[in-house]
Image: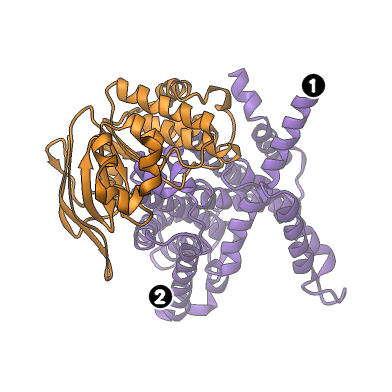
Chain colours: A purple, B orange
Amino acid sequence: MVRAVGRHRGALLVFGVAALVPVFVRDAYFLDSLVLILLWGALSAAWNVAGGYAGQVSIGHAAFFGIGAYSAALMGTRFHQSPWLGMLVGVALSLVAGAAIGYLSNRLRGPYFALSTIAFSQVLLIVASRWRAFTSGSEGIPVPFRPGFATLGLSHVAWVYMALAVAVLYWAIQVWLEHSRFGYRLAGVREDEDAAQALGIPARRLKVIAVTASAALTSVCGTLWAQYVGFVDPFYVFSVDLSVRFALNAIIGGMGTALGPFLGSILITSLETYLRATLSGVKSGFTGIYLIVYGVVLILVVRFFPDGLAGLADRLRARRARAQA
Amino acid sequence: MLTLERVTKRFGGLTAVREVSLEVRTGDLLGIIGPNGAGKTTLFHLISGYYAPDEGRVVFDGQDITGQPAHAISRLGLTRTFQIVKPFGNLSVLDNVMIGALTRRASTREARGDAERVIDLCGLGPHATARARALPLALRKRLEVARALATQPRLLLLDEVMAGLNPTELAAMVDLVRRLHGEGLTLIVIEHVMAAMMRLAQRIVMLHHGEKIAEGTPREITSDRRVIDAYLGEEFVLAEA
C-alpha cells in the first residue's frame, strides 16, 4: 500500500489538488478551466489507450468524440431521453465504429492508419453537417440545460467532480494496462508486431480491442463535453484540430504513460486559456497569435523532452537517485 | 514432429522455395545452409506461419498447420527467432522475456518467475533491467532466443543467431544451443558460420535457388560435390582436410 502510494505520487498530487480546488475557489472561470483540463486529459488518456499503449496513432478520434456528443444531444432533443441513455447509445455506436475501423485498417501501419482515421472522422463530419432533417446540419444543436443529475444539468462544482471521477477512472484503466497480461502483450504488439506474433500473441485482435476500447472511452467524454458546454457544432466536434489535440496532450505529456495525458492537458489547456484571454481579441491586434505561441511551445517540448513531461519527471527522479547513491 | 510436403512459395515470377520436403523428428537438431537468397528464411516464414505456402503442406505433431497464422502456430509450441533481431526496443530485457512467458501464463507474477529463469539460462541476468534497444548485438541475439524460449516451445527455429558475433560470443551461443538441445528441445538452425554448424547439427539440409539440393550428416554434406560448388568452395574442403 505504501509502495503503491509512492509509485503514484504524481497522480495523487494532480488529482488531489483538483479535488481540493472547488473547496477553496468558487470563481466560475477558474472552475471552468479545471473541468476542461480534466476532460481534455481524460480524452487524451482515452486516445492513449490506442495511440500510446497499442501504437495505433489515430488523428481521427474526434469521430468518436462527435458520436458521443451527437448521441446525447439528439437523444435529448429529438427523443426526449436522458443524456445518460444518449451516452450509452454513443458508446454502443463507438464500439461498432471503433471495431470496424480497427478491423478494416488492421493491415495498415504507421501513417496509413492515422490517415484512415482522419478520413473516417471527415466522413462523419459530412454526414452530420448535411443530414439537416435529423442533425440540424451545420447549424448545430443547442443542448437544453435541465438541472439535475439525471439530465446532467450540473453546477460548476459538480462538474469538476464529474470530470475528476472520469479522469481518475481513465487513469486507473491506463495503470491497469501497464501491469496486466493484456497490457504487456499489447506493448509487445506496439513495439514489434511480427515478433509479438512469434510469441503467440494475436496481434491484430489485440489492436482491434485497444482501438475499440479507446473509441468507447472517447465517446463517453464526448457526451459529457456536449452536456457541459451545451452546444454541438459539427465543424468543431468532428474537426481534425480536436483529434490533434487529443494526440498532442498525450505526446507532450508522455505517450504510453498513465499520467502523461493529464500533464499534457494541464500545460496545453491552461496555456491556451491564458493566451486566448490575454493576447487575442480585436483590440489587442494579435488575433490568433496564441496559435503561434502554442506552436512554439509544442516544438520546444517535443525537441527537448521527447519522452514527454512524464519522461522528464522520470529522468529527474533517476538523477536524484543517482545523486543520493 | 515436423513434416514439410513439397512446399512451394512464389513471389510473382520468382520461386523462392520450390517443392521442399523435410522431416524433423523429436530431439533432432537440423541445420539449414545455403547461399544468400537460397530461400532459407522464406522456408522459416512458411513453417512459422508468416507466409502461407502456394503449394504443399506443413504438418506439426500430426496436425496440418498449413496457412495458419503465426500466433496460433506459436501457441502450439513452434516458434522462431528473426535474422534481423526484433527486440521490443523500449522495454526492459525482463519485460521482453515476460511477454513471451505470458503466452503460457495467466498471471504476470508467474510469467515474471519464468522470465527470470530463462534470462539466467541465457546469461542475460546482469542485463535484466536494461532497455532492449541499448544492448549490443550479441546480447540482442541472445534476447531473441530467450524471448522465444519463454513461450516454452517444443520446436524452435533459430535464424542466424550466430551471425555477427565475435569468437567468444559465438562459443557462448553454441554452448547455449547445445544445452537447449541437451534438455530435449528440437531445433532447426539456419547458419552461415560453418564451423559452428559442423559442431552442432546432426543433419544438414542445403538449399540453393529455393530447392533442396542435398541432405545428410555434416560429413556427408561437406564432401558433397554440389554443396562445395554452390556454397562452400574448395577452400573450405581444404581447410577441413
Q: Is residue B184 left or right of residue A255?
A: left
On-image quarter of the C terminus of chain A = top right
Residue type pointed to by label 1: Gln
In the displayed structure, B26 sits above or below A261; it is: above
Look at discs 1 and 2 and give the one toward the viewer. Answer: 1
Q: Earlier in the sequence, mark 1 or mark 2?
A: 2
Q: Is residue B91 visible?
A: yes
Q: Where residue B143 sits: x, y (%)?
A: 47, 34
Residue count near mark 2 (Cα–Cα under 10 Å), binned few <14, some 14–19, many ≥20 = few
What residue is rendered at 15% in x and 35% in y? B61
Q: Residues within 10 Å of mark 1 (few under 14, many from 20)?
A: few
Q: Is residue A41 above or below residue B156?
A: below
Pointer 2: what residue? A134
Taking depth in this image into account, of B42 and A163 the one nearest to the observer is B42
Residue A121 vs residue A23: left or right? left
Report the front residue among A87 and A95.
A95
Give the image location of residue A217, x and y in percent. 47, 50
The vertical placement of A134 against A311, above or below, is: below
Which of the chains bears the disc numbered 1? A
Q: Which residue is mark 1?
A: A324
Question: In the rendering, at what x and y percent does residue A200 appear?
Answer: 33, 40
Q: Say which chain tag 2 marks.
A: A
